[in-house]
Amino acid sequence: MLADLGMGSLEDLFAHVPKEIRLQRPLALEKGRSEFEVREWFSGMARRNSAARRDLVIFAGGGAYDHDLSSAARALGGQSAFVTAYTPYQPEVSQGVLQALFEYQTLVARIFGTDVANASLYDGAAALVEAVNLAVGATGSSRVIASGGVNPAYLETLATFGAGRSLELEVAATDEREATAWGAPSGQAAAVVVGYPNYFGTIEDVAEARTVANDLGALLVVVADPVALGLLEAPGALGADIVVGEGQSLGIPLSFGGPYLGLFGASTRYLRLIPGRLVGETVDADGRTAFVTTLRTREQDIRRERATSNVCTNQTLMAIQAAIHLSWLGKEGYQEVSRRCYNAAHYLASRLETIGLRVSSAPFFREFVVELPIPAEAVRSRLFDQGFLAGLAVRGRPNHLLLTATEAHTREEIDRFSDLIAKEI
Amino acid sequence: MLADLGMGSLEDLFAHVPKEIRLQRPLALEKGRSEFEVREWFSGMARRNSAARRDLVIFAGGGAYDHDLSSAARALGGQSAFVTAYTPYQPEVSQGVLQALFEYQTLVARIFGTDVANASLYDGAAALVEAVNLAVGATGSSRVIASGGVNPAYLETLATFGAGRSLELEVAATDEREATAWGAPSGQAAAVVVGYPNYFGTIEDVAEARTVANDLGALLVVVADPVALGLLEAPGALGADIVVGEGQSLGIPLSFGGPYLGLFGASTRYLRLIPGRLVGETVDADGRTAFVTTLRTREQDIRRERATSNVCTNQTLMAIQAAIHLSWLGKEGYQEVSRRCYNAAHYLASRLETIGLRVSSAPFFREFVVELPIPAEAVRSRLFDQGFLAGLAVRGRPNHLLLTATEAHTREEIDRFSDLIAKEI
Amino acid sequence: MPVTGDHAGGRASSAPLVGRESEPTIFELSVPGRLAYYARSTGVPEWPASEIGAHLRREPAELPEVSERDLVAHFTRLAARNYSVDVGSYPLGSCTMKYNPKFADEVAEMEGISRVHPGTPERAIQGWLEILSSLESYICTITGMAAATLQPPAGAAGELTGLLLMKAYHRSKKRDPRKVLIPDSAHGTNPASVTLAGFEAVTVPSGPDGLVSVEALRSLIDGDIAGIMLTNPNTLGLFETKIVEILELVHGVDGLAYYDGANLNAIVGVVRPGDMGFDIVHSNLHKTFATPHGGGGPGAGPVAVAEKLVRFLPGPLVRRETGGDLRWHYPEESIGRVHGFYGNAVVLARALAFMRYLGGEGLKRMSELAVLNANWLRWRIQDSYTIPYGGVCMHEFVASASSIKKSSGVRALDIAKSLLEEGFHAPTVYFPLVVEEALMFEPTETESPQTLAGLADSLIRLAVIASENPELLAERPLRTPVRRLDEARAARKPVLTEDQRTAAPSAS
Amino acid sequence: MPVTGDHAGGRASSAPLVGRESEPTIFELSVPGRLAYYARSTGVPEWPASEIGAHLRREPAELPEVSERDLVAHFTRLAARNYSVDVGSYPLGSCTMKYNPKFADEVAEMEGISRVHPGTPERAIQGWLEILSSLESYICTITGMAAATLQPPAGAAGELTGLLLMKAYHRSKKRDPRKVLIPDSAHGTNPASVTLAGFEAVTVPSGPDGLVSVEALRSLIDGDIAGIMLTNPNTLGLFETKIVEILELVHGVDGLAYYDGANLNAIVGVVRPGDMGFDIVHSNLHKTFATPHGGGGPGAGPVAVAEKLVRFLPGPLVRRETGGDLRWHYPEESIGRVHGFYGNAVVLARALAFMRYLGGEGLKRMSELAVLNANWLRWRIQDSYTIPYGGVCMHEFVASASSIKKSSGVRALDIAKSLLEEGFHAPTVYFPLVVEEALMFEPTETESPQTLAGLADSLIRLAVIASENPELLAERPLRTPVRRLDEARAARKPVLTEDQRTAAPSAS
Ligand SMILES: Cc1ncc(COP(=O)(O)O)c(C=O)c1O
Ligand SMILES: Cc1ncc(COP(=O)(O)O)c(C=O)c1O
């Protein structure tokens, strides 16, 4: 091949790259290894991590939950036709990905109770950032009132990205019931943001947040837990303009925090401001039903500096995985998982109350805050030695723990955990 | 659906089954469990087994070898289009399986140096049984002279199945070099069977076995280790009429002994006596190349009690896996693996000789017998506690061990193993 | 203009996503020097090959030389040219092509399952022994038997094993009867196994109702009968209602009764071979218990036996010690081993996973629905196809295209090939031999009413086309990866390897 | 005759193996009461829902109701309707669609990788921290930078992160420059990110050689320049040979230089962004380092920076304690986190697996072959297509169908669609915007000479057809799962969900 190009060596391909910047020595990296050795290196690393169910019973959530995942969904999502495809730019040969995304959009819209949903964003935090961007674009205001009950990592991400365009972010504190105390903000705002249930598990009053938003001429953005919506009223039905959330619970393994899935649903009012990819139905030259990415003019590759968002690569595979998982659950299974999470968390809370601990009093879904008589970190550490991830620390409250339980937790596990906590306090 | 059939309950479907034999109570089995629980039950069982590389360094062979297996081959062989298909009775929609088997047949024939190969048998033992059946059919004799160096489990299986039609099985003992002492058998026989290398690792003299077979008017059946043939002359080139072997080494995990893969290659002289499936090339109605199972008239579903074999379900998926694995190795990799096994086994043997042990003196490939000054079982047991499967016991020789090493063993592992053995003796 | 000539020796690795391009063989894709293989660095020194001088291979085996990328594309595209259960309905009679739950794949891949050497000491395989022991007990409970060997790697191997047990039983009684009775509708493996076991197959004719003719049977019974081999429901999908009487006749001359478990999917939890009076039962785990067929295998064909035959079983079996540990056990009068190791162990584990998933009730429901589906499908097509035998069928049924053939010339084969075009797999055709133009359907319990209705609609449509435009069906299929093949050509001058292929005149 | 009416509410689950039947949506396959889900029995008691009375959902979400069997068939068939790298060549420019070695899938699935909660204490995630730390060091070595955040989940997120770092840098110097320079050939994410970061995008025109015009650039430089964003090689596949001069101009006004690493596949081991003078570099791990694209994601876009920017990086980073343990570390002047957790961790692990597999030499060879393949493919088609820019190209090149269009009316789009029919994926079309009728090819290093030759042959053949029978190309593709779509209709009245679909008048 080099000869065809009139070249003598691979070096010649780079002859036009200025010598002074060319790397004159080999990269200071280890030499290559067979896949067996690389796999074994990673096995070694993997053994130095505590894995859910293998090493640890996980009573920690905070945006990442240990659910039972079906093998069928895993096998289907792992098909190489999905895994090794690119963005479906050529719909004639991408109907698999496109139809799966269309089904995903439908599922998210139905769960959220919104008119439409997009084909995925990076994660829950990114989805919130994009929702706020949309609200800013739609209202012309750059002020945002966010509940302090929203996942603190999401708020921090919002603050990071908001800094670029001088977002004015005001955080409304939560009260002792772990619910938002909105106060009576006045003036104009782009968005009011509330968690549902919020980071502390509390089922916030979305209707109240809607009123606050109305008063400010703001869009209501709800950060929802999609699993909760098997039991709780859909935010769309409660007046949310935009509903976002973390889709990890919908069939994605814990994965040390990623890749996860940013869910984004909205009212058709904002259709042309929606970030990310949208898949729509159409027909082909023979009149047969087919799917295609649509409303492309919103996107960065067409609108460039005036795009609604810069997102390009997103989380398609995770969206497909979620669509498969939700279809595996089905209408009934989805409700049942939701209910079982609720049952497990409440059973856990009741066990802890029995041993004298105080649990947050507001209605909660599958996550709640418990107050210990001693520093939580010490308890977490000792429980860890006994095979339990005892929740998450609560920022600024050293004696509190944020605990969760899901449909994957057995009564035996919850009992054992509560008994061990009892011994610690 | 029941109503369409004019029935009221599922029970009605079985109304014609005589009451007195119908099971009047539930099956005395546990109740069903979710896949999560079943998986966890099996995880529990799996943890109670010692796995190669995870828990044990395996220096044991005996027809089952620990090789490095590529992920690509594993992923390709695991595609549901292969896994969940049936026997390719409808070639129009089975070209995937058929072409893969055609490629497999070619690979086996090339490795064995035979004209043709079939599309798989159950395992090495079954392949030997079928080879002997063929020889009996071809010669009219029912006498078989088998080397005592053939895998004892294969000889036992041959004896079991041979009993049906009164096979006269004579076993020629091996000498102190672990090679066959044929003696000078006279008369007629159907087959002479020799291992190559044999069960003890010794590279038998196939040409000599050919002479013995000639003297008896018998077919020469070689039980070959396919990995060895990257280094050793092909049995077909040495005059074997039929070459069989265990294909586990060609990409199939240890699997506690199964499913494995019976390899079967033969001269076209015996084409119409070959057992099992054969895939051949042809054309379709449009003249395009296509593959189909052929020479079906040999098979049980057509010839019934006069069939050459009763085999129906075989090991197709394993054959496909082997074809993929061999293609991954390629011409060069296949030779290199062979050579690396040879190197590793000889390095191991040399280390053991250094510590004063006696290793069998005949040329061997990747397996050899070593004599210990103390009972082997005790050494095996103590080495096991230190993470090594120290070979296999040798029937009737309590102080001997049958050891192997493959391309997957590192010098470090071999050194450590030898050092530990040194401490034991 | 540039030419490809300089870079010959391989083929482009791209092929249409769909369409009907044929895929080059892996040998055609091969290019000298190309390699996917990448060896572990072990540090083991090179050892001189001189030691094996005379034995050294002269010509290396011509394995293909491809990159991993091309390897992956090749076998991915081959897979795309294959129909399978995961793609659609597969109503192949006698084969029980049901959906295989995916979680069993993960069980099969667990390190502690898949990476265990068969020579590992008993203390370090207690998990495996527990799996085998648990499976043996499930099988015995389901079949109504006393003990089972799990070694036979397929149904046919089970048959031969069972027949050798039969022989051992008679020999232990110092008898040597030579004949084994087999119905005319039996699967081909039955007579073939009978021959291999050194018996003589004696055919028992079916009556007009498709069942074994008890009269005919009675006339065949004599002191030389070693036993009978039956599947019940039989291969026509009909339950042999006189089974007790039949087996009594055989037992009356001290013959044994062998149950071919290929049709077990019809009766789990409903009626047990042991309760019918059978002495030996093989189960096709790859049928009833949902271990995938793998394009033709691997399977597993455990053989369960009545108490009086336990001592003849192949060893080793798994038995519990007084201490609670499980151990390998070799029956005293064993016929000897029938597999190089312990059978298709991982297939056995998959089957147990399926059994534990469904449990006792689920297994019974499985059979009930399998029977319901077959009856309903039969009902849906009964006006379009001849149904040679009436009454309730079990998990499968045989239809016939004989009247269609008479009126239009369209054969069972044409219907089968046309069904491929409709997106379904074909039924089994021309089997069992006792029915002319047989189309044997086994929908299994995993197909939905909608799929069955779709299948029935296709079949009905094909019957209509057969009467109106029969010539259309002779052309089909048109859109499958390849069309009908010249099978005669394949058999006339067999081309079984790439070498024969390149030696032979080109295929086209 | 029996009808299906009674069993309506679902569709047959069979579809042709190949052919062009469309697949029903999962909602069309739904039948009330059907279920794949099977819950673990936990023994956890039911808790009254009264507590959340007012919040209870009134109408359950209408999720589909399907059996696991039908679910598997549906998504297996959808997969069969999708082209992918594993099926064939995917020369999509700017996307680096290379083969992704399979062993990385197994790394990603290891329990100790995939089942780790992000809130696990540091002592129990030392393996994960080691992976992240090792990857950071590989990235820094490859790019010539001091430290990196691994959080950005894609290239565009990396861009925004990098631009915020740029902003933080200037603010730390009490400056607030507003403009970021971007070449006219830049990828759309660059200007979009610039806007989102609160900067103003200023376009730098390319010269006739396809490279940044240094003159034009010089005229745009002033004190309000925050920095420049470049990819090198640029999106035309050309190496910006004046890069040192360009960056000196920008640095001259204390601007920072951002390297869009989407094109890193051209230069690994050959030349490093840091050595060119860049301050901020994102890497698209899903391009250069072979983490699969997943139909459009997930990816990972780590951002590496020069020493002077390290203190602004998003936290947490992984740093080693004196004791040797790894810990989370939060830089003092951090811009704050840019992901809910630590980025697309499993994607990061895959990339590291790839890097460790190839090693330093292998990574360099990767880039060399990527560049060789692109040049060779360009050479093969240069007589049939306009090549707007001469000289050696890097890992990709842009061809143009402009002369073909002029003479025959055949557009770049027609060539692309016809290539699908030939069995190849299309190149990127109409990008970059500076080339008319652009066809942008990036063959990558994993395609063999034979595949490249096959692709070239197809392209040459299409050019011939364009001149002889142009109308044929407007019709193509014909044999793909669907043919060309009515995209205008999709945008005119968007149907984005099944509900809008059933509400809208039927599609056909
Ligand atoms: C009725 C019957 N008996 C026996 C067998 C043989 O079983 P196997 O294919 O597992 O050897 C079959 C298989 O098709 C069968 O249908
Ligand atoms: C040149 C260039 N820059 C940036 C990007 C954006 O990267 P990502 O898609 O990962 O967000 C791309 C992706 O296509 C690209 O090609």
Image (spheres, coloured by chain):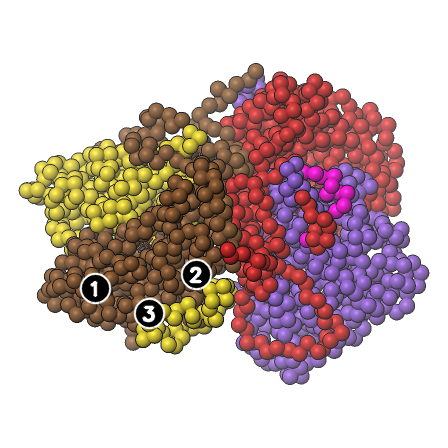
Chain colours: A yellow, B purple, C red, D brown
| Disc 2 chain ID | D
Q: Nearer the viewer, residue D171 or C201?
A: D171
* Relative image position of residue A94 (x, y in whole percent): 42, 42
Furthest toward the left, the residue is A187
What kind of residue is marked 1?
Glu
| Residue C424, quarter of picture | top right
For discs 2 and 1, the disc positioned in front in the rendered view: 1
Furthest toward the top, the residue is D1
Q: Residue shown at 64%/84% (left/top)?
A: B354
Q: Nearer the viewer, residue A422 or D286?
A: D286
What kind of residue is marked 2?
Asn
Vertical arrangement, residue D406 with respect to residue D320, above or below: above
Q: Residue shown at 81%/54% (left/top)?
A: B132
Residue density around tag 1, few if under 14, some if 14–19, many if 20 or more, within 10 Å: few
Judge left or right: residue D346 versus residue C264.
left
The disc, 2 or 1, on the residue closer to the chain's N-terminal end is 1
Q: Residue shown at 17%/49% (left/top)?
A: A148
Quadrant showing the C terminus of chain B: bottom right
* Alpha carbon separation for disc pair 3 and 1: 25 Å
Q: Which stretch is magenta?
A: C485-498
| Disc 1 chain ID | D
Considering the numbered disc 2 on the image, is that residue within a helix, a strand or a loop? helix
- Please name the residue that numbered disc 3 is placed on: D272
- Please name the residue that numbered disc 1 is placed on: D215
Residue density around tag 2, few if under 14, some if 14–19, many if 20 or more, within 10 Å: many
